[in-house]
Amino acid sequence: MFKIIKAEKLAENIYSMIIEAPRIAKSCEPGQFVIVRADEEAERIPLTICDYDRSAGTVTIVTQVVGASSLKIVGLKTGDCLADITGPLGRPSDFIDEDIEEVKKRNYLFVAGGLGAAPVYPQVKWMKEHGVSFDVIVGTKTKDTLIMEREMEEVAGDHLFITTDDGSYKRHGMVTVVMEDLIKEGRKYDVCVAIGPMIMMKFAAKTSLSNGIPTIVSMNPIMVDGTGMCGACRLVVGDEVKFACVDGPEFDASKVDFDGAMKRMALYKTEEGRAFLKEKEGLTHKGNCGNC
């Protein structure tokens, strides 16, 4: 059992939890995720690690209610316990294993759409702690759906740019509009990291790549079981079959087949669609098959 140190509502149907998990907190890095179960009857849900405190032995997750199992998770309160939390899983962000002096030579642009603010936060926090230059764009539909503004401001300061689709808060427009504005202002970026809904990542990557900026995207939106065994997060990266949960979740955006991944997501939602994909993809339908 894993004790919930703090549970709070961030926005409508979006909640955060600080969980006592010292072994995970000790070894996790930005970009990784955990698998959570509310109780022994609940579904296993992969959730990105939003923050961690090694000294306190805690990790923070953010959950959006999309079904019965996520509803069970957010129904737990401070002092309650989760049945399971397993991790860290997935590959850390590339910069974690790079020479820090080389990383410091770069200027990063982070683009977070909606719930994507949660996985972007530990990355920009790491950048701040290691003295790396960066800007952060956080986009959301309305002011009411904005999350983690205070935390982002604490690490990004004047380098944080918030935009809303309806213009109800800060800038007006999608993240791609702000990206173009910053580039037109003369800001130079060596790497762009875009995390959020699939359609947002597709167009954010299109914008950054067209401006000659190497771009990384996180394919965590397509993960289901988190081990590669369900086949949900199968995608084509370049000319290779990959699985977001075991090979990622972060990939070179220039090689990701976004249209194929989004079409596959729609098919996977139905039993008939899953059967079709299993038959069509054969031995490469699931991860760890030795043929991917």
Image (cartoon, helix red, strand yellow):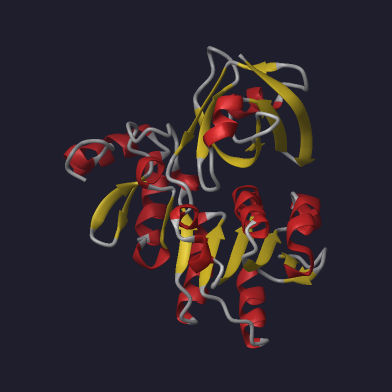
Res 67 quadrant in image: top right
Q: Is residue 208 visible?
A: yes
Where, by quadrant of the figure, is residue 69 drawn?
top right
Between residue 147 and residue 33, name the one nearer to us.
33
Q: Nearer the viewer, residue 54 or 224?
A: 54
Q: Does 191 sit left or right of 76 as displayed? A: left
**The quadrant where residue 155 appears:** bottom right
Up the image or down, 68 lies above or below 40; here it is: below
Q: Is residue 125 left or right of residue 196?
A: right
Image coordinates of residue 169 in percent, x first then y, are 82, 64
Q: What residue is at 73 percent from the left and 62 percent from the top?
A: 156
Q: Position of residue 8 (x, y in %)?
A: 78, 33
Q: Residue at left 60%, top 72%?
A: 176
- In front here: 40 or 265? 40
Q: Position of residue 274 (x, y in %)?
A: 32, 36
Instruction: Assign the N terminus to one quadrant of the image.
Output: top right
Camera sees residue 200 = no
- Across the whole image, how many numbered discs are drawn on residues? 0
User: Residue 168: x percent and y percent?
Assistant: 82, 64
The residue positioned 61% from the left and 80% from the top of the image is: 180
- Nearest the eye: 199 or 132: 132
